[in-house]
Amino acid sequence: MKPARRIVAAAALMLLAGCTSTRVGDFTVGSPKNLSHRFTVLGGEVTGEDCTHLVLLLIPIGQLNPTTDGAVDAALKQVAGADALIDATVHKEILFTPIYSRVCMNVVGKPINTRGNESE
């Protein structure tokens, strides 16, 4: 293959790949559970992620759609007794290539406990 054709082929393959991160939203308080109005902050920021992986654009590995609830749950699991996040930010991240693709929901926030001493 001539060098010019190799460059054109490489450029075409690079055009088929892409990556993006989109801010989905901000929440003062975010939780997939019912909460009381009193709470205790349990530490600094935590990050949770829920992802879908695709092979050859069609074959999902794991779940089909990432969710904000899944990302919040992943963040809350990092701190014992946490049942919600405050000052939370949600991002959607997409990596796209013809061979492997990934879509993730990412949540960053401060964990809180709204149930007093009760833990799950």
Image (cartoon, rainbow, N blue to C red):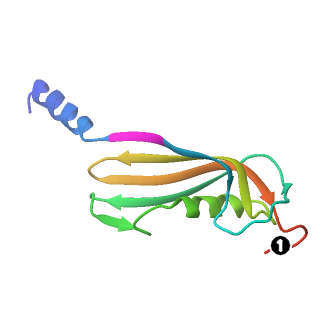
Residue 33 appears left or right of 96: right
Residue furthest to the top in view is 4
Magenta-highlighted residues: 18-22
Residue 48 appears left or right of 36: left
Residue 28 appears left or right of 93: right
Q: Nearer the viewer, residue 39 or 81?
A: 39
Q: Nearer the viewer, residue 41 or 13?
A: 41
The image quarter containing residue 69 is bottom right
Residue furthest to the right in view is 117
Amino acid type, mark 1? Ser
Residue 78: x percent and y percent? 73, 60
- Count neighbours of disc 1 (C-alpha within 10 A) and say few if under 14, some if 14 to 19, many if 20 or more: few
Residue 8: x percent and y percent? 15, 29
Residue 107: x percent and y percent? 60, 51
Q: Nearer the viewer, residue 1 or 20?
A: 20
| Residue 54 lies in the magenta stretch | no
Number of marks present in the image shown:
1
* Residue plotted at (34% across, 47% down): 96
> Is 14 placed above or below 72 here?
above
Q: Quadrant of the N terminus?
A: top left
Residue 103: x percent and y percent? 42, 53
* Residue plotted at (11% across, 24% down): 4
Q: Quadrant of the C terminus?
A: bottom right
Kindly identify which residue carries mark 1. 119
Describe the element under mark 1 as helix, strand or loop.
Answer: loop
The image quarter containing residue 30 is bottom right
* Residue plotted at (81% across, 66% down): 81
Residue 93 appears left or right of 16: right
From the image, give the main secondary structure of the stretch colored magenta: strand
Residue furthest to the front in view is 37
* Residue plotted at (41% across, 53% down): 102
